[in-house]
Image (spheres, coloured by chain):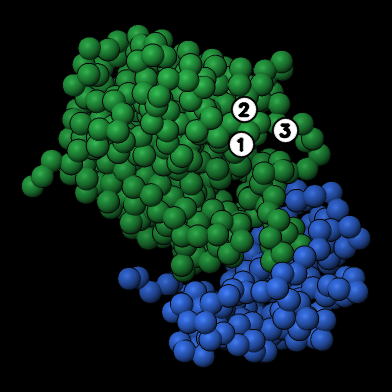
Chain colours: A green, B blue
Amino acid sequence: MTRNPLHEVAIVGAYNTRQARTLDGETDLSIIHDAVQGVLGMAGLSQGDVDGVNIHTMRGGLSARNGVHILGGHPCWTGNAEMGIAAVMEAAAAIATGQCHTAIIASGQAGMYTDRSATSPWTRPSNEFVECWGLYTAAEFALIAKRHMALYGTRPESLAEVASAIRMNGARNPEAVYFGREVTPQDVLDSRMIADPFHLLDCAMNSEGGGAVLMTRAERAKDLALDPLYVLGGALDRQGMAYVTPPVWDKYGYVGRRAAELTFGQAGLGPADVDVCEFYDPFSFELIRQFEAFGFCGEGEGGDFVMDGTVRVGGRYPLCTNGGIMSFSHCGVVQMLQKVISAAQQLWGLYPEELTVPDANVVMISNGGAGALFNDTMLVGREAA
Amino acid sequence: MSAPERGDIPLPRPTAVSAPHWEGCRKGELRVQRCDDCEGYVFIPQAYCTHCFSEKLQWVRSSGRGVVYSCTTIHRPQRQEFEVPYTVAIVELEEGWHMLSNVIDCPHEEIEVGMPVEVFFREMSPEITLPMFRRVEGAEIVPPSRPETA
């Protein structure tokens, strides 16, 4: 069989700036500058060593094509994919096919969410068949969760266990926005209701910050500061109009299954080979769904699967070891990329001892969820496929 | 029992494609597109059939009866203009298609998956009448069935 050219690509830097509920005095560009400097420093490279770029933000007119100027304006390949797995896979393909040799992916946000009297503006729909009923992101994901609960008897206690497991990781991560904020399952159940079945602590928070990932060819990576991490596989599942089409479980409930099968297939691995799960965690139920969709357990079994410490650090499938978007940080467009960053930092042993998964070799990453009608997956490992 | 506060909520802005649906609501009809070729129902309104790509879509009148496919009671409003709590539902209509709406005139804690509901219409402005759903009194809950696995 022909070798998958994806396996010639390595991650050589993955950096987060400071994260906070609000970063006073910062702008998108100042945060992006920090992220770019930080990730280049990790690898021991400078701007001129990079010839591939995907730097963009939601605001300020910084398109991916214009983002090249941040590196000085020398000729570069540019990516256009969304931050996260999509951008990493696009850059990996560009490197693998010789369009560039070293690519940087970065974004950052500051000063976005100032009116906290209502849901954050980007979670609100504008479609004529959605907005007038009072939906927003939490409601879309709640509609997915409630159908699963009705079909399979999935209990709020399972949702609370997931949220607690993730938030306890953030409580132990000095870089997390909610560092020191310990949350038990009972705390989750006792927090105020947002959109049934989601209590406040079942939901991700909002914050500001930035991050960056640096990638290059595997043979070049061996000379750099950190051990190369290999992209073992990755794929995107997109099913259409998020926050427009009703999130009907029968059609969208297992979005991500195809992506996971392709991802595992590229890597020659299966769920049993995964040591750490840096899954996308917008709402507690979404993790239960992803374990089912990705084949870690059977349909309807996710509620039981996550109990008994299985998804805590020290358990078989630790989730979101940096604290995820529930506790670490959830900012603008870079938050999806921060799942990749967390996977890399876990494998490099950069986390405090109590968050480090001993001998971890393979991390599975996901972006998106059923409430948004998309789910992307990726595998990263310490050893080449 | 309350409906969402209806004073200043954002109202739909019909498009050329969706206008027949909203015109139907003004006349007390729940209209949906149906494909002449594959007989599939299409919602939200489209310029072609999303099942088979046919352009032969016709507007037809739905019975307006269905069940709650899924629901969530909202305690943190999308905007302050929505009075909480309110219940958002995906309604599965008798013809097999799905739409988002509110279920009102029923205690929120009694609204559950499988509850039979029927459409009624609430005039919001001269242009916009919203289709909402209420419980069919005396009807039995229809338990959800598992999707067929591919």
Q: From the image, tell me which residue sits under label 1.
A: A58
For the residues beneath circles 3 and 1, the answer to whether they share a chain is yes
Which subunit holds the residue at mark 1? A
For the residues beneath circles 2 and 1, the answer to whether they share a chain is yes
The answer to which of marks 3 and 1 sits earlier in the sequence is 1
**Relative to A21, A299 lies left or right:** left
How far apart marks 3 and 2 lie (CA) works out to 10 Å
**Residue A83 at what x, y percent from top left?**
48, 36
- Of A147 and B9, which appears nearest the observer? B9
Q: Residue at x 20, y 31 (%)?
A: A8
Three-letter amino acid code at disc 3? Tyr
Labels 3 and 2 touching (C-beta < 8 A): no
Residue A297, compared with residue B39, is above or below; it is: above
Q: Residue at x 38, y 74 (%)?
A: B148
**Relative to A126, A230 lies left or right:** left
The quadrant of the rendering that contains the C terminus of chain B is bottom left
Q: Is residue A73 visible?
A: yes
- Of A267 and B67, which appears nearest the observer? A267
- Of A54 and A34, which appears nearest the observer? A54
Choose top left, top right, bottom left or bottom right for residue B62: bottom right
Three-letter amino acid code at disc 1? Met
Q: From the image, tell me which residue sits under label 2.
A: A109
Mark 1, other Cα within 10 Å: few <14 / some 14–19 / many ≥20:
some
Mark nearest the camera among 3 and 1 is 1
Q: Residue at x 19, y 27 (%)?
A: A383
Give the structural element (helix, strand or loop) at label 1. Answer: loop
Choose top left, top right, bottom left or bottom right for residue A357: top left
**Residue A229 at what x, y percent from top left?**
27, 25
How far apart marks 2 and 1 lie (CA) works out to 8 Å
Q: Is residue A146 visible?
A: no
Labels 2 and 1 touching (C-beta < 8 A): yes
**Relative to B57, A346 lies left or right:** left
